Image (cartoon, grey):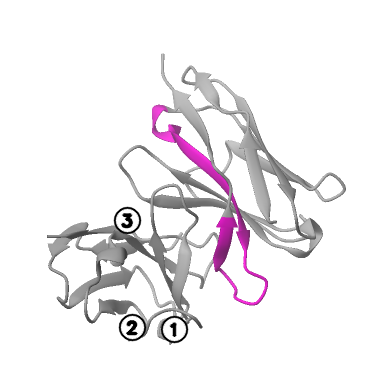
Amino acid sequence: DIQMTQSPSSLSASVGDRVTITCQASQDINNYLNWYQVKPGKAPKLLIYDASNLKPGVPSRFSASGSGTDFSFVISSLQPEDMATYYCQQYENPPYSFGQGTKVDIK
Amino acid sequence: QVQMVESGGGLVKPGGSLRLSCAASGFTFSDYYMYWIRQAPGKGLECIIYVSSSGATIYYADSVRGRFTLSRDNAKNSLYLQMSSLRAEDTAVYYCAREESDLVGAIDSWGQGTLVTVSS
């Protein structure tokens, strides 16, 4: 199985701050990476697919980049509604493994 | 509306067995790839099973391969997860999830989950 290493595990930032999360794959996954936002009691919400494509309807403050084994996810200006846990997920090889998650809190 | 309802969770002793079910409704079940995803207490998401729309192809995570067996019944719009040789580390909420039709790997909905607790 492909291992996904995500960091940090948690962070606390102020409204308006820029937030960066990284995700590293144990092998080359090309650009087969999703980023999700998960709030308690809700299904994961897909934000980014193919490593850098913003899903239609997702605010443009969310972005991501990377390919191969190293990826990053950015919230350019953190908003109160962005408080959630964020996960990367590879879909190069099934079953499609997730990173450990990053819990984002608002200071 | 799209709905998945998981059932069958509970308390089981280490080494024991349990069978989970996922009943889907509100969509053409036979058209979709499906997942079982679990979340241990205080931990992140773990994708343990990925099954093709027909059920002919099933992928298992290393952590459950050889102990868990999935079956899919498209006539009953259901997934069944037979879990055996259960360990403490299998304690988690188990979710049945649907893959979005247009985006490989993308989850677009899941159920409320069912809690499995493995403890003596």
Residue at which label 3 appears: A100
Q: Earlier in the sequence, mark 3 or mark 1?
A: 1
Give the residue type at disc 1.
Leu
Residue A3, given in percent of the width and then of the height, sits at 37, 61
Describe residue A74's horizontal placement relative to residue B21 as left or right.
left
For the residues marked 3 and 1, what is the alpha-carbon distance in whole angstroms?
22 Å
Tag of residue A54: 1
Give the residue type at disc 3.
Gln
**Residue at (45%, 24%) from the top-left corner?**
B118
Q: Confirm or deny contact between disc 1 and disc 2 (CB under 8 A).
A: yes
Q: What is the span of residues highlighted in magenta in the rendered image?
A: B88-109
Q: Are marks 3 and 1 on the same chain?
A: yes
- Seen from the viewer's position, the closer of residues B112 and A66 is B112
Q: Earlier in the sequence, mark 3 or mark 2?
A: 2
Q: Earlier in the sequence, mark 1 or mark 2?
A: 1
Tag of residue A63: 2
Q: Secondary structure at mark 2?
A: strand
